[in-house]
Image: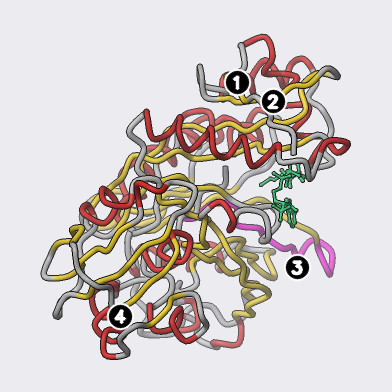
Amino acid sequence: MVTHHVRVLDPDELRAAHTLFAAALHLDPLDDESWERRRHSYLPGRTLGVSDSSGLIGTTMSFPARTAVPGAALPTAAVSRVGVRADRTRRGVLSELMRAQFDDAAVRGEVIATLRASEARIYGRFGYGVATRAREVTVGTRGGLRDGAPPGGTVRMLPAGDIVAATAAVHARIALDRVGGMTRHEQLWDQGIGNRVRRHEHVVAAVHTGPGGDDGYAVAVPGGSDGGFADRALRVTDLHAAGVDATAGLWRFLLGLDLIGRVEGWMRPVDEPLELLLADPRDCRVTGETDETWLRILDVPAALAARSWGPGRPVRIAVRDPLRPRNEGVYRIGEGRAEPVDAAPELQCDVAALAMAYLGDRAPSQLAATGWWHVHDPAAVARADAVFATATRPWCGTFF
Ligand SMILES: CC(C)(COP(=O)(O)OP(=O)(O)OC[C@H]1O[C@@H](n2cnc3c(N)ncnc32)[C@H](O)[C@@H]1OP(=O)(O)O)[C@@H](O)C(=O)NCCC(=O)NCCS
């Protein structure tokens, strides 16, 4: 296979990179005005490309973020806009881009990388594993919340001009409270809800305030209608809440809006307790569940050392990582710490399967039973479950 030379793209090549990526996803190129805004989301030095005699044939970019893991927030490369020109696929271009991107992120001190995958069969080979999942729900508005559901605090609607600043402030305050949550840079707000506000679209946005201050927000846009004005759908595009009170307060507000027949939630946490809050649990229909973020642990010793661990006796796990061999070794995890040891492993996994357990999405016993983890000592599986266990399911909630 030909070796492809990966290089950092110059600022004047970024539009071509964006167009290449968009075409790979069968999206339209940006017009001049949209590009003028979007180009700011390409941070200096973070876009990689491969060219041949015909021009640019592949690209990827990343931006820095912090991701909440149990007990810590880790510097993260948030990877996006991955594309290879359709007439140059399956020749190893992405493979070279991925390798170079890992090296680049590692030099920047980024301990993990995260992305959302267009297809589930692309990234596992590079050591990415599904680390958070999300569900889609459709909630009928007829029954509302049950008596006895937490009343929640106060909800205030936001005028269009305040939506970005107010929701961004609440997000910055609470996003890292939940494992899997990540920080958002200004451009993500500008491209997301900022875009809708600029286009003067109707947006329903509200902030929830609890005893400790603003602790949640919801942003939603109207969808279609099955029955004229009185039965509109409302599509929640972004809803973050610091706890069950704020969750209840915000959903009570959304479900109580006049003329709305159903509220559709996209990429919601799998453990969002809607069925427990509703008067009729069947008002909540789960219409899909999917992988949300994929995690690549770039620096295994650092990632393991940073995470807090559950109680119980330690377990020894061998990690394989052919792409980044310095991660390979046996790690002793438990009693509040993780460290490399010179001892025989009880369990073994590759770095992608470690990522699947790292934030608590999958229990080691599930991964062992399905062949993702190899078991040398069956007694170690229950200990691994105990040390990896987390109280809530990880969830990111940011589209990038
Ligand atoms: C996905 C994409 C980036 C892959 O690029 P590529 O240069 O063809 O990838 P590579 O040649 O380096 O592939 C490496 C390996 O992954 C496999 N692979 C790559 N894309 C795959 C896919 N979509 N499905 C299954 N396998 C895939 C290749 O077959 C190859 O396997 P091999 O090593 O066993 O031969 C490219 O097909 C693309 O741009 N797709 C459309 C846009 C897109 O989905 N981008 C990702 C956004 S998250």
Q: Amino acid at mark 2?
A: Val
Q: Secondary structure at mark 1?
A: strand
From mark 2 to mark 1, how far is it between C-alphas?
Answer: 7 Å
Are discs 1 and 3 less than 8 Å apart at CB?
no
Question: What secondary structure is the magenta-colored segment mainly?
Answer: strand
For label 2, the residue is 50
- Residue 62 at what x, y percent from top left? 53, 33
Say whether disc 4 or disc 1 marks the residue closer to the N-terminus: 1
Label of residue 385 in the image: 4
- Direction top: furthest residue: 12
Say whether disc 4 or disc 2 marks the residue closer to the N-terminus: 2
Front in this rendered view, residue 235 or 98: 98
Q: Secondary structure at mark 2?
A: strand
Q: Is residue 382 rendered to the left or right of residue 167?
A: left
Q: How many marks?
A: 4
Say whether disc 3 or disc 2 marks the residue closer to the N-terminus: 2
Q: Depth-wise, is mark 1 or mark 3 nearer the camera? A: 1
User: Which residue is drawn at the image coordinates 36% and 29% (left, top)?
Assistant: 108
For label 3, the residue is 231
Ligand 1 closer than 8 Å to label 4 CB: no
Q: Amino acid at mark 3?
A: Asp
Q: Classify 137 as above or below 284.
A: above
Q: Is residue 268 rendered to the left or right of residue 71?
A: right
Are discs 3 and 2 less than 8 Å apart at CB?
no
Ligand 1 closer than 8 Å to label 3 CB: no
- Residue 319 at what x, y percent from top left? 36, 62
Q: Amino acid at mark 4?
A: Asp
User: Which residue is drawn at the image coordinates 57% and 42% (left, top)?
Assistant: 400
